[in-house]
Amino acid sequence: MTTTTTGASAGASTGPERSQGPGGLGPLGWLRWAWRSLTSMRTALILLFLLAVGAIPGSILPQNVVSVDEVATYFREHPELAPWLDRFYLFDVFSSPWYAAIYLLLFVSLAGCVIPRALTHARAMGARPVRTPRHLGRMPYSARFTTGASPETVLERARGSLRGYRTERYGDSVASETGYLREAGNVLFHLALLGLLLALAAGSFFGYRGNMLVVEGDGFANTLPSYDAFYPGHWTDVDDLQPFTLHLDDFEATFIEEGDLRGQAASYVADMAYTEAPGAEEGRHRLEVNHPLTVDGVQVYLLGHGYAPEFTVRDADGEVVFDQAVPFLYRETASFTSDGVVKVPDTGGEQLGFVGVFLPTAADDGDGGLVSTFPGAEDPVVTLEGYRGDLGLVEPQSVYQLRTGGMEELGSSPALRIGDTWNLPDGAGSITFSGLSEYVSLQTNRDAARPFALGSAVTAVAGLLVTLFVRPRRVWVRATGDADGRTVVEVAGLGKTEVAGDNAAFHDITTRLAERLRGEDPEPRPTRPGSER
C-alpha cells in the first residue's frame, strides 16, 4: 500500500523553519511576542500598579529630596536598618534605578498601546456606520409597526428622528451610530496620561530641587555651595542657576496649648525678603506651608522649622572666639527636643567642640533628669558635653556630627538657660548660652514642565468624564412593503453601555418616528401586540 502526500500536507521540509522545532517562534517571533505583551493593556495596568506600590516607601520613609535632616535622624535612630534601606534606594525612591525602570516600561507600554489605538479610532471616526443586520428582531431592542407612508418617506423621516446620530443609507434601511466621543474620551485620557508622564520626565531632566536651612536674620543666594543638598536634573546646567536671593527676616511658629491636641502646630509663618537678581527691586513674601514663594520661575516651599541656640565662646584670656547661632536638629515634633554640635576651631590653642541637647520647654522628669514637655520655647534649656583637641576638619564631615576620637573630654555642663555661662575645666575658656533664634527648612523646585503636567492632568479628567457620561448607541430602521400595500417599519437598537432592559432612548426614537409618520397615515398600527423588546 502506497501513501502519497502533496503540498502543505507533506511531513518533510528542507526550509530553515525546521531548525526551530514545532511551534518555534525564532528571534523575530520572540521580539514580536515581547512587544505585544509589553504594549497590552494588562501589562500597562500591572506596571501602573507597581508604580503605585513602589511609591509607598517614598511616602512612609523620609526622602533626601525632601529633608536630608530627617534622613539623618532616621540613620541615628535606626543605625542597623537604615544602611540596608539605603542600599535599595528607599531614601531616594523616586530617583532610584528600579523606580526609573518601572516608569520607563510604563511609558513605553502606554505609548505602544495608546498611539495605535488613537490612530485606529481616528480612522473609525470617518468610517461608515455598521450595515443593517438581517434579523433586527434579535437586537436587545426591537419594535415593528405599519404605516401608509412609502418606504422612502419612512427612511427620510427616520433620518430626521435620529438627531445627533451619524446615518447611512443601505438599500431599504438606514443605519446610524452615535457616541463616538466615548472612545475619543478614552483615547484622550490615555494620551493625557502619556503627556503627564512626559511632563514629569521633562521636569526631572531639566529641573532641579534643593534643600537648605536658613536661620532668622540670615540670607540665601541661589548658588550651588549655598545648598545643604542639591538634586539637579540630568541636563541641568548648575552653573546657570537663577540668581535670586532670599533673606529670612522673622519666623513664628504657634502651637496648640490646651486640650487633646496640645503641642500640635497651629501655624508656621516666615516673613521673607527676596530679589530676583542682583540690584533688582526687593520684594516681600509671607511664606507659609502650602503657600510657596515663586521667584524667577523657582518655587520656594516651607518644609519645617527648628531652633538655633546662640552661643558665645571665650578662650582662656576672655577673648570672644565664637559668637553665632547653631541649628539643632529635632528628634521628634511632639517636644522638639533637639541635638546639635558646636565646633570652635579658632581658639588660638586646642580646638573646642560641644555636643548639645536643646529642650524648648524644660521640666523635671521625676528621676533627676530633664525633658521637654512642649514644642514652644517657653523655658529653653541647653545641656552640653565639652571636648578639647583636634576637630579633624581637614577631612569632610557633617556639621551635625563631632568626631571625638582625637579629643579629650571636658565633662558635662549644668542646665544652661539663656544668659548662663559654663566655665570650662582647666582654664579652657567658657561658653555662654546667649540667646535663641529659629530656623526654617526650605526647598527650591525648578520645573518648567509644571504647566504641561497640569494641562495633562486636566485633560485626563476631561477625557474620563466624557468616557463616563457619553453612551455609544446604534439604531437601524428598515422599511419594506407588505401585501396590503402598507409599509412595515422595523426599528432596532443596540446600546454598548446600557444596563440590560434600559431601552428608553430607543423607545423615544420609535415614538418620534411614529409621530412624524402620523400625518402620512392617521392610524399607524403595530403588526402585533408586544412587538417591542
Image: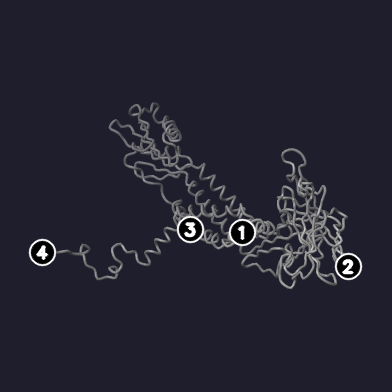
Instruction: Say the numbered circle drawn on residue 285.
Output: none
Q: Which mark is residue 109?
A: 3
In the picture of the structure, the residue carrying the numbered disc 4 is 2
Q: CA distance from mark 4 to mark 1?
A: 79 Å
Secondary structure under badge 4? loop
Q: Nearer the viewer, mark 3 or mark 1?
A: 1
Residue type, label 2: Ala
Which of 466 and 402 lies nearest the eye of the viewer?
Answer: 402
For image coordinates 58% across by 60% down, the residue present is 84
Question: Going from the N terminus, do you reach mark 2 or mark 3 first?
Answer: 3
**In this rendering, would 506 be left or right of 20?**
right
Nearer to us: label 4 or label 1 = 1
Residue 196 place in picture, x, y as percent: 57, 55
Residue receiving disc 2: 316
Q: Which mark is residue 82?
A: 1
Residue at the image position 82 percent from the left and 65 percent from the top: 279
How far apart marks 3 and 1 lie (CA) works out to 34 Å
N-term-proximal mark, 4 vs 2: 4
Task: Indicate the quadrant where residue 394 lies.
Answer: bottom right
Measured Cα–Cα span from mark 4 to mark 3: 55 Å
Query: Can residue 199 be seen?
Result: no
Q: Nearer the viewer, residue 350 or 157?
A: 350
Q: Earlier in the sequence, mark 1 or mark 2?
A: 1
